[in-house]
Image (cartoon, rainbow, N blue to C red):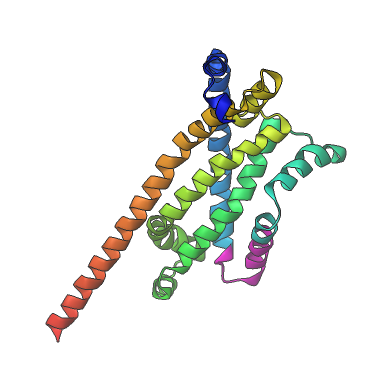
């Protein structure tokens, strides 16, 4: 592998294929954006259901979360791509990958949303109820706007995980970055080192900024919490 990475002619052959890699990179971006939109929609819906007062929506959300969190994404992908056509449901590889990655990540995002809602003081729910707000109004007007700030760092981390998970499209010839790099290395001159190194760097360029921003934002929130706690303590001392 090290010898491959240090061999100049392998890199020359790889950069000849750069337009193909670029198209695959764009395909990965498209799959990531579409899967993220699906995951966010499912995550918010099932996160709200997990926090509902009634048992039925909580039970439905729990089944969804437990099933998709406790089964491998690869099995879900293979089931949808290979098994569902026998039931008359056929999806192309790209759509199948977007669907599976989106639904899989949605289960994790729903837990992030549920935890964020659970961190809001119960008194705000009671105050909204006393003012005649419905559950949906309470969530959309009062609770969710506060929840966004709390859940943003773990939500961004889930976005980074989603981008990495799109590499499973390579297993069903999805035309993504991993598939094209692996196909080029396998069918060409076996230059696995350069192909996988470049692929890893491109994924890193997508995920590292997200992870770094999430870490900085989380540290900023912690500093704000410490400062707020200190201010409140100072006010209590002054009042005493």
Instruction: Indicate whether residue 100 is drawn in magenta.
Output: no
View extreme (front): residue:
3
Report the front residue among 28 and 133: 28
Please tell me which residue lies in front, 208 or 139: 208
Q: Image point 23% across, 66% down: which residue? A: 227
- Location of the C terminus by quadrant is bottom left
Which secondary structure class fits the magenta region best?
Answer: helix
Q: Position of residue 171 (x, y in %)?
A: 71, 35
Rendered view: 183 above or below 59:
above
Looking at the image, the residue that sits furthest to the bottom is: 240
Q: Is residue 176 above or below residue 221?
A: above
Up the image or down, 236 lies above or below 151; here it is below
Q: Quadrant of residue 228?
A: bottom left
Q: Which residue appears at 62% of the width and 37% of the height?
A: 167
Nearer the observer, 102 or 226: 226
Residue at (66, 35) in percent of width and height: 169
Does 59 appear in magenta? Answer: yes
Residue 118 visible in rendering: yes
Q: Which residues are magenta?
A: 50-64
Q: Is residue 175 visible?
A: no
- Where does the image place residue 140, in percent across and percent down from the top left? 45, 57
Query: Residue 70, how many percent across, how many down?
Result: 68, 58
């Amino acid at each position: 592998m090290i010898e491959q990475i240090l061999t100049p002619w392998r890199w020359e052959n790889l950069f000849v294929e750069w337009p193909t890699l670029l198209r695959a990179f764009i395909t990965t971006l498209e799959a990531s954006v579409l899967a993220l939109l699906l995951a966010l929609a499912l995550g918010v819906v099932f996160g709200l259901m997990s926090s509902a007062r009634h048992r039925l929506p909580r039970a439905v959300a729990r089944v969804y979360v437990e099933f998709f969190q406790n089964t491998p994404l690869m099995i879900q992908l293979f089931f949808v791509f290979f098994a569902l056509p026998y039931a008359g449901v056929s999806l192309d590889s790209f759509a199948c990958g977007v669907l599976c990655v989106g639904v899989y990540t949605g289960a994790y995002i729903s837990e992030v949303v549920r935890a964020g809602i659970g961190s809001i003081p119960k008194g705000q729910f009671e105050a909204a109820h006393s003012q005649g707000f419905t559950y949906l109004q309470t969530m959309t007007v009062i609770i969710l706007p506060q929840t966004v700030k709390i859940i943003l760092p773990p939500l961004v981390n889930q976005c980074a995980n989603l981008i990495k998970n799109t590499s499973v499209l390579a297993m069903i010839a999805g035309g993504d970055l991993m598939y094209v790099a692996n196909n080029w290395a396998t069918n060409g001159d076996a230059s696995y080192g350069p192909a996988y190194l470049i692929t890893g760097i491109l994924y890193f360029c997508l995920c590292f900024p997200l992870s770094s921003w999430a870490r900085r934002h989380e540290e900023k929130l912690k500093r704000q919490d410490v400062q707020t706690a200190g201010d409140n303590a100072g006010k209590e001392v002054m009042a005493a």
